[in-house]
Image (cartoon, rainbow, N blue to C red):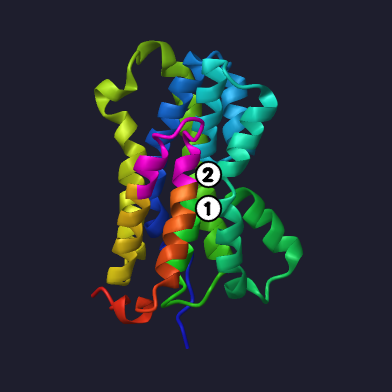
Amino acid sequence: MKPQLQFRDAFQDALPIVISGFVFGLVFGVLASKAGLSPLAATLMSLMVFAGASQFVAVEQWHSGQLSLVAIVLTTLLVNLRHLLMSLSLRPAFRKEPKRKLIPAFSLLLIDETWALAEHRFKKSAPSLRYFVQAGLLIYFGWVGGTLLGTQLGSHIPRPADFGLDFTFVAMFLSLMVLLWQRSLDFFTWLLSGVIAFYAAQLPGIGQASVVIAAIIASALVAALPQAGQLGIDHE
């Protein structure tokens, strides 16, 4: 029988992400303030949306003024389509949970980080919606707190990249990749995704959507490999 997850597990697992998410939220707050959003608007966006990548895309497009509001909404929707796949991936683990609990939890707290933590933890421990919600709320408040502080510091940080703050996003996802790396085939999938995303981004009109396109194409190609089962050697 798998062990039960406790709050201390959620706290220990989420703490590194809370710290990096706080810094990442701070960067978002700075950029949002420079894009013309008020501190209240930027903070409300983090409170209600809680999706870092799509929020950055929305603010970038808002600042450039090249896209209409409808185009911005559709672009962020495309970026977040991966959430459908993440919810389908976790649904079997929560099949005994009532929808009245599962739908609110997934609607707000299902992000790349909470999905990765759940996928990692539920392999060796009993699936727990409480663990998922606890870890998600810790990350959520770190993100919102960082956004609020960033909106206040926006005028004092002219170029976040000068302080290396723009690398926070990359570092956080690299740490998640380490958690999820189980097979040598995983690394091949990520490498292929990176190559496809790089070249897709060069095409006109693709932009941020290149990441989603690359992930779908690379995953489909690797899954179609006849030797996929043989390449899936455990990474110990």
What segment carries the magenta color?
A: 196-212
Image: 51 above or below 123:
above
Outermost residue, bottom side: 1
Secondary structure under the numbered disc 1 in the rendered image? helix
How packed mark 1 is, by other alpha carbons closer than 10 Å (few <14, some 14-19, many 20 or more), is many
CA–CA distance between discs 2 and 1? 6 Å
Seen at 34% across and 65% down, the residue is 186
Seen at 31% across and 81% down, the residue is 230
Q: Amino acid at mark 1?
A: Gly
111 vs 236, left or right, is right
Q: Amino acid at mark 2?
A: Tyr
- Which residue corresponds to mark 1? 136
Secondary structure under the numbered disc 2 in the rendered image? helix
Image: 183 above or below 194:
below
Quadrant of the rendered image containing residue 94: bottom right
Expressed as whole percent of the image width and height from the top left, the position of residue 177 reads 34, 57
Circles 2 and 1 in contact, beta carbons < 8 Å: yes
Residue 6 seen anywhere in this rendered image of the structure: yes
Expressed as whole percent of the image width and height from the top left, the position of residue 166 reads 33, 31
- Which residue corresponds to mark 2? 140
Residue 110 seen anywhere in this rendered image of the structure: no
